[in-house]
Amino acid sequence: MLTKQTVRFDPSYFQLDYPNGDVPQDKGVCTDVVIRAYRKFGIDLQKEVHEDLKSNFSKYPKIWGLSKPDKNIDHRRVPNLMTFFTRHGRHNQLQATQETIYQATSFVGILVVQ
């Protein structure tokens, strides 16, 4: 059960199987929880993001200075997931207030630029 797992924050780079690769179950970052939840519904975000990046690399953030997609990490990066969800119609701009109520299935991403 996904909601009963204990996951220790670990942003390390891991070599992953492809498709359906995952970091060790007891490790991860916020995106790994989202990736695992999508897998419960039969959606492999590692594969989906990687395939979209291969075809549309120029549409994704260039924050990390990469010249090509990396199947081991790209799907684990919040800006890449936000780009992927926007490109595939899973994005809504919300003005968050104290009164904002999210549905149980809402995925909320916040990108802080320094």
Image (tube, rainbow, N blue to C red):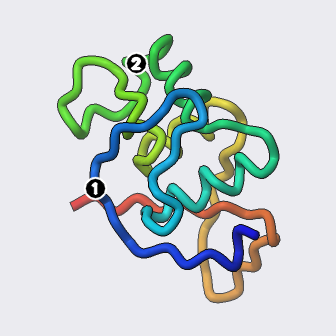
Measuring from the top left, give residue 46's x and y in whole percent.
55, 35
- Residue 97 position by quadrant: bottom right
Assign a secondary structure to mark 2: helix
- Earlier sequence position, callout 1 versus callout 2: 1
Assign a secondary structure to mark 1: loop
Q: Is residue 89 above or below residue 8?
A: above
User: Which residue is outermost to the top?
Assistant: 55
**Residue occupied by mark 1:** 12
Q: Quadrant of the C terminus?
A: bottom left
**Residue occupied by mark 2:** 57
Q: Which amino acid does label 1 sit on?
A: Ser
Q: What's the CA distance linking mark 1 and mark 2?
A: 23 Å
Measuring from the top left, give residue 109's x and y in whole percent.
53, 60
Q: What residue type is labelled 2?
A: Phe
Q: In this view, does 89 lie above or below 57?
A: below
Could you tell me which residue is drawn at 42 percent across and 75 percent down? 8
Specify few, some or many for label 2: CA neighbours under 10 Å numbering under 14, 14-19, or 20 or more.
some
- Residue 3 position by quadrant: bottom right
Could you tell me which residue is drawn at 45 percent across and 40 percent down? 80
Could you tell me which residue is drawn at 51 percent across and 38 percent down? 83
Q: Which of 40 and 104 is in front in this view?
A: 40
Is disc 1 in contact with disc 2, using a CB cutoff of under 8 Å? no
Specify few, some or many for label 1: CA neighbours under 10 Å numbering under 14, 14-19, or 20 or more.
few
